[in-house]
Image: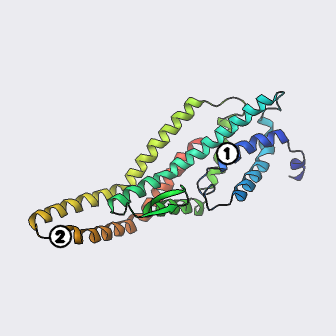
Amino acid sequence: MLEELLKLNIFAFLLVLARVGAMMSILPGIAAAYVSPRIRVLLAIAVAVVMTPVLAANLPGPPEHAWILFLLLAGEIVVGVFLGGIAVILVSALQTAGTMIALFSAMANALIQDAVSEQQSSVIANLLTMAGLVIIFVTDSHHIYFKVLADSYNLFIPGAGASTGDMALILARRVADSFTMGFQLSIPFLIIAMVYYIGLGVLGRLMPQLPVFFFGLPIQLTVQIGALMIVFSTIMMVFLNYFRQGYGIFTG
């Protein structure tokens, strides 16, 4: 191993580092605001050092002109951002589900700073997103990050030019699938909210003098939070399976 590191091709290392660094810069759980940028840089360099000796034989040689080098590096960065972006889109299914659940639970205005998306989001969306990332790392599903990265050199060969049309199509499909998955995860809460509001409306018609909203909101919160406690583990398992299948399309 030491001999391979001493013979490390600097140009090949830069090509690998460009793709690895771009991917690491936006990967969920690694590119979050609570992770130090130094850790991301060191992780990207470490992964590039390990992968370069394995991939060096399949990488193009040093170009004769600087502009060709610029194009090669730019292409690698685009591929890295694309691979990392797919992971972000898959995880955003939990953000969508949490936002919808908060809406159905009358907690849409309970906002908190989300360390993953780096913006304000509902408490439930933040809970689901953080729990989803924890599940990914606890179950060692984060290993798929590195497997996708290694296998990507068979799909997106450096210097061969990436198919932007196929990449755009994959992005569009993943966005649609992510929204669909988020909606499906929130369906139990939608059904509960519909049944509850229909019953509340009937009760309001039968007893016009009853202040339904006075006691309706606490009951709604209690029922929806109880439902979340019951289906929380199921939501996490469904998401984990969805994440593995959605990101596994890039593995051989």
Q: Secondary structure at mark 1?
A: helix
Residue at 67% over, 29% down: 161
Between 221 and 20, the residue placed more toward the observer is 221
Between 174 and 56, the residue placed more toward the observer is 174
Quadrant (top left, top right, bottom left, bottom right) of the C terminus: top right
Whether residue 232 is visible to the viewer of this picture, yes or no, is yes
For disc 1, the marked residue is 22
Mark closest to the chain's N terminus, 1 or 2: 1
Residue at 38% over, 67% down: 230
- Give residue 211's mark: 2
Q: Position of residue 40 (x, y in %)?
A: 70, 55
- Give residue 175's mark: none
Please state which amino acid type lies under the numbered disc 1.
Answer: Ala
Q: Secondary structure at mark 2?
A: loop
Q: Position of residue 10 (x, y in %)?
A: 84, 42
Residue at 70% over, 35% down: 74
Q: Position of residue 73 (x, y in %)?
A: 73, 36
State how the image is colored: rainbow
Q: Is residue 21 left or right of residue 174?
A: right
Q: Is residue 131 left or right of residue 56?
A: left
Q: Nearer the viewer, mark 1 or mark 2?
A: 2
Residue at 51% over, 52% down: 91
**Taking 158 as reference, is 96 above or below it?**
below
Please state which amino acid type lies under the numbered disc 2.
Answer: Pro
* Other residues around mark 2 within 10 Å, as few (<14) / some (14–19) / many (≥20): few
* Other residues around mark 1 within 10 Å, as few (<14) / some (14–19) / many (≥20): many
